[in-house]
Amino acid sequence: MERLRKASHAGSWYTDNPTKLGAELDGWLQATGLAKSPDVRGVIAPHAGYSYSGRCAAYSFANIDPTNITRVFLLGPSHHYYTPKCALSTATAYKTPLGDLPIDLEVIEELQATGKFELMDLQVDEAEHSMEMHLPYLVKVFQGCRVKIVPILVGALNSQIEAMYGKLLAKYVDDPNNFFSVSSDFCHWGSRFNFMHYDRKHGAIHESIEALDKMGMDIIESGDAEAFKKYLSEYENTICGRHPISVFLHMLKNCSTKIKINFLQYDQSSHCKTTRDSSVSYASAAATKVDT
């Protein structure tokens, strides 16, 4: 039986007009000036409303060469629903204004059979925006290709559970037909986020935020999941996709394919100058296969 997850944030977080949306994404992708590479096997990209993060996100998706990819794993954080595990979608397809993306039910069954995942009902799925915000870009980039998706909602995992999921999913990285779309915004700064870390040696508040984010980005690029955990513990940076990123780092550590993460673009929703201000940071990265 067909179960469609509707594009619940279309018309608010991004336009639900297919012509307008398509043109917007094309413009942003073209503006990056980046070339497609078959070695790009994954991305880390933001998930805010497109007016804030759409332009930054394009730097991740512009790299993708869709030729040999048949399956995209989506790893997104859970903003509204608490689970100490990862949850799988119960939908059969995800709708977008640009077309629908079918879910790979075989892989969902395979993952479910491990006993390590829970299932999320359609209401939980539709309330969450972290994976949905990647979908229009994926439809656009994979236009004309037969591609299926495997959405995985990543809950509030502890370090051991992150490592466990990383090991479990690592084998999928070694299949060159698989691609990984990891969803995360970076620092959420301001009193409304209960986070106001400010190191004056970097200059203005927004420069301190950038320095803090770049420190985390450098650690992610190093591929060291333990160092990333230590950084989060020490600075408490409000990176909402920290669990999906950590799982992805463990996947790359446990697979046979050598893959390197490189950040390509960084942006902030606004430049904080006083403690009354607030902002959210966005960073886009490509995970590229490198020769060993």
Image (spheres, rainbow, N blue to C red):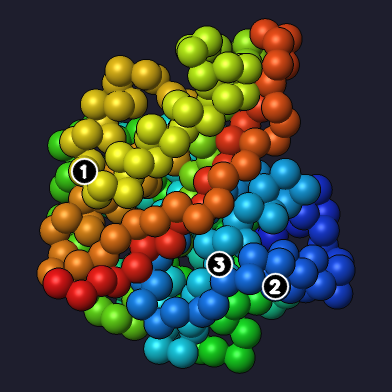
The local secondary structure at tag 3 comes to helix
Q: Tell me which label, 2 or 3, sits earlier in the chain.
A: 2
Q: Is residue 156 left or right of residue 37?
A: left
| Percent of width and height locating residue 179 | 39, 72
- Residue that label 2 marks: 30
Q: Is residue 183 left or right of residue 30?
A: left
Q: Give me the residue at 51% from left, 36% from top.
A: 186
Give the CA separation, mark 2 to mark 3.
11 Å
Give the CA separation, mark 3 to mark 1.
24 Å
Nearest to viewer (mark 2 / mark 3): 2
Marks 3 and 2: in contact by CB < 8 Å? no
Residue type at tag 3: Phe
Image quadrant where residue 252 sits = bottom left
Residue type at tag 2: Gln
Q: Is residue 116 left or right of residue 21?
A: left
Q: Give me the residue at 20% from left, 67% from top.
A: 258
Q: Is residue 162 above or below residue 149?
A: above
Q: Give me the residue at 69% from left, 60% from top.
A: 7
| Percent of width and height locating residue 44 | 45, 54
Residue type at tag 1: Asp
Whether residue 140 is visible, yes or no, is yes
Q: Is residue 104 above or below residue 94?
A: below
Q: Tell me which label, 3 or 1, sits earlier in the chain.
A: 3
| Percent of width and height locating residue 111 | 26, 64
Image quadrant where residue 171 sits = bottom left
The tag on residue 261 is: none
Q: Is residue 44 above or below residue 156?
A: below
- Residue that label 3 marks: 61
Q: Residues within 10 Å of mark 2 (few under 14, many from 20)?
A: few
- Residue that label 1 marks: 224
The local secondary structure at tag 2 comes to helix
The C terminus lies in which quarter of the figure? Answer: bottom left
